[in-house]
Amino acid sequence: MIVTKSFQAQTKGDGQVIEINGEVCNQVTDSGVSEGIVTVFVTGTTAGVIIMEHEPGLVEDLDAAMERLVPRGIPYQHNIRNNDDNGHSHTRACLLGPSLVVPVAQRRPLLGVWQRIVLVDFDSRPRQRDVIVQVMGE
């Protein structure tokens, strides 16, 4: 069985981390799939989906790490060619990726005690993000 659903998340951009774990878990439970996998995918090229411990210190650490790796204030060819300001957003999203897969058993994602599924929006402006949740199994 394959069940595909989606939901929307309103974001502020600029590296905002939004926990979507509860919504994903609810959709897995509602899917009726007992054993299998769930894929979580965000549409767009300036956001990513990851698993992390969602606590304020680590959120700040992630933002600081991204700033060290992909600074906001340097020239980006994307910005030059497209008269835009979010080249860093696209580059940061490439590092995280738009999707992840989690095993499912007993109608729930098999996540560790502190693991949470989060959406990270790197865009330079607020966005409404579409998140696709596809549950596959039996």
Image: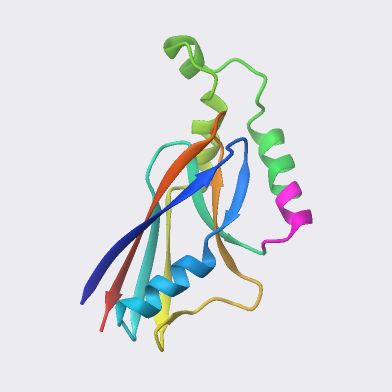
Residue closest to the far bottom = 106
Residue closest to the far left = 1
Q: Is residue 55 shown in magenta?
A: yes
For the point 52% across and 61% down, the residue is 20
Q: As displayed, is residue 97 above or below residue 50?
A: above
Colouring rule applied to residues = rainbow
Quadrant housing the C terminus: bottom left
Q: Position of residue 120 (x, y in %)?
A: 56, 47
Q: As displayed, is residue 95 above or below residue 31?
A: above
Relative to 45, is 5 on the left or the right?
left
Q: Position of residue 69 (x, y in %)?
A: 66, 35
Q: In terms of image quadrants, where is residue 2?
A: bottom left
For the point 47% across and 11% down, the residue is 83
Q: Is residue 36 shown in magenta?
A: no
Residue 94 visible at all: no
For the point 37% across and 70% down, the residue is 38
- Main SS category, magenta section: helix
Relative to 137, is 100 on the left or the right?
right
Quadrant housing the N terminus: bottom left
Residue 36 visible at all: yes
Q: Position of residue 100 (x, y in %)?
A: 43, 60
Q: In terms of image quadrants, where is residue 53?
A: bottom right
Q: As displayed, is residue 13 above or below residue 54?
A: above
Front position in the image: 131 or 50: 131
Relative to 29, is 58 on the left or the right?
right
Q: Position of residue 27 (x, y in %)?
A: 39, 71
The region drawn magenta spans 54-60
Relative to 16, is 45 on the left or the right?
left
Q: In terms of image quadrants, where is residue 26?
A: bottom left
Q: How many marks?
A: 0
